[in-house]
Image: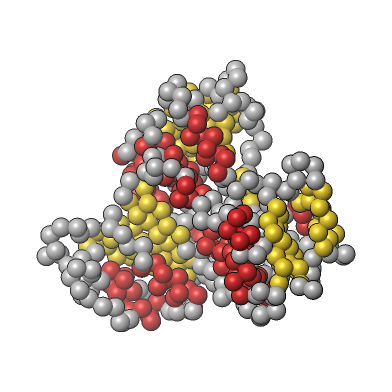
Amino acid sequence: MKEKIVVIGANHAGTATMNTILDNYKDKEVIAFDSNSNISFLGCGMALWIGKQISGPDGLFYSSKDILENKGAKVYMETPVNKIDYKNKIVYAQDKNGNKYEQPYDKLILATGSLPIEPQIEGMDLKNVQYVKLYQNAQDVIEKLKDDSIKHVTVVGAGYIGVELAEAFKRNGRNVTLIDLADTCLASYYDKDFCDAMSKNLEDNGVELAFGQKVVKLEGKEKVERVITDKQTIDTDMVVFGIGFKPNTKLGNGEIELFKNNAFLVNKSQETSIKDVYAVGDCATVFNNAIQKTDYIALATNAVRSGIIAAHNACGTKLESDGVQGSNAISIWGLNMVSTGITLSKAKALGYDAVCTEFEDYQKATFIESGNSKVSIKIVYDKTTRIVLGAQLMSNYDISSAIHMFSLAISEQVTIDKLKLLDLFFLPHFNQPYNYITMAALRAE
């Protein structure tokens, strides 16, 4: 009899888990449960859809129930799991038609994802108050934007999702206000000078910024009409919340050990505190190489990698995660920003004796007369150990590939001095003989 591996949650982490098992271990039986009607929706493309930068949502899906079942899995959609008996290894679920399932397992992989943080304020039940995570959320927003009476949209939360949505609604022809409790945008990913450059970019393109403000309530009769902050009243026709996510770990039932933010605490093999039970994606922890500690970083890339690792371990192949650096990127009206590791401000807050080295120059040789843009780079490192802790780059040029090298540098605990004379090629079409990476490293104390 084939060993049964049950996967709960079939989005990015769950899909990666199933594909890895189905492609490599034909002797395993894969059964999956998901509460949604679709899987593999790339939420990062939601803003592109809303902003009319892509024609529709079809390309935002890369897998489906049919694809996975054609490879040998059994996938139950719209079938939420309501209980797990960890002692007897049984999963209990019920579909939308009331059909109940009692599914025994040999190995269990939890890919239950995350849930939007919902502020506990008055007026959240008004119409046109939105969250954006699932395909259905985006579809709902798109449908409502067909109503020309929605002239103003307020976006609450100026992290990646909020900034991308602010651009999207503006591209869609709406007036936009972006609110955040912090005094700038993207504060978790970049130091203030980079954040302020993006804030200026948003303002230059017509987004009204309301930073350093707390939303205290929403007002309206049936639909939302006003956002009340601790500093002003904003007339609006739609409010979209993107203030963060929390791990969805209720199925742990108090039996699985949790991290400080209630994510499932896993080891480098993705195994939880219960034998034969693994957790992957947004519901689980990661090992952060930048700080050399267990951490929580919810990214689709982390979800996919963790799914692959859990799948191999569940099937008997020992494999450990190399850890992550939280590499990320954003592109708003042509301003590209990428980062990995931790910022200077976060490094200092964590107690590192951290400093940074910075440089700005043109990407290509200056005699290249077209298609040349300035690049700003910041490398954060520990003054005592010299180890690189983080890097940030910003340009109108596509400098995104450069961050991969810094991601590897952090993973391998490379020192800033190692980068000073690193063999980096030169060709005028691409860069300069004294390129910005070399020059930033050479400037290090």
**x and y percentages locating residue 382 in the rendered image:** 47, 73
> Quadrant location of the N terminus?
bottom right
Q: Nearer the viewer, residue 148 or 397?
A: 148
In the rendered view, tell whether residue 137 sits above or below residue 70.
Answer: above
In the rendered view, tell whether residue 60 sits above or below residue 353.
Answer: above
**x and y percentages locating residue 370 in the rendered image:** 15, 58
Q: Residue at x 39, y 42 (%)?
A: 55
Residue 242 horizontal side relative to residue 416, left or right: right
Residue 358 horizontal side relative to residue 367, left or right: right
**x and y percentages locating residue 129 in the rendered image:** 57, 31
**x and y percentages locating residue 204 in the rendered image:** 31, 39
Q: Nearer the viewer, residue 163 or 354?
A: 163
Residue 264 horizontal side relative to residue 223, left or right: right
Q: Residue at x 44, y 33 (%)?
A: 177
Q: Residue extending furthest right?
A: 88
Q: Residue at x 38, y 40 (%)?
A: 52
Total marks shown come to: 0
In the rendered view, tell whether residue 150 sits above or below residue 44.
Answer: above
Q: Nearer the viewer, residue 355 or 3?
A: 3
Q: Residue extending furthest top?
A: 221
**Display colour scheme:** secondary structure
In the rendered view, tell whether residue 322 sits above or below residue 286.
Answer: below
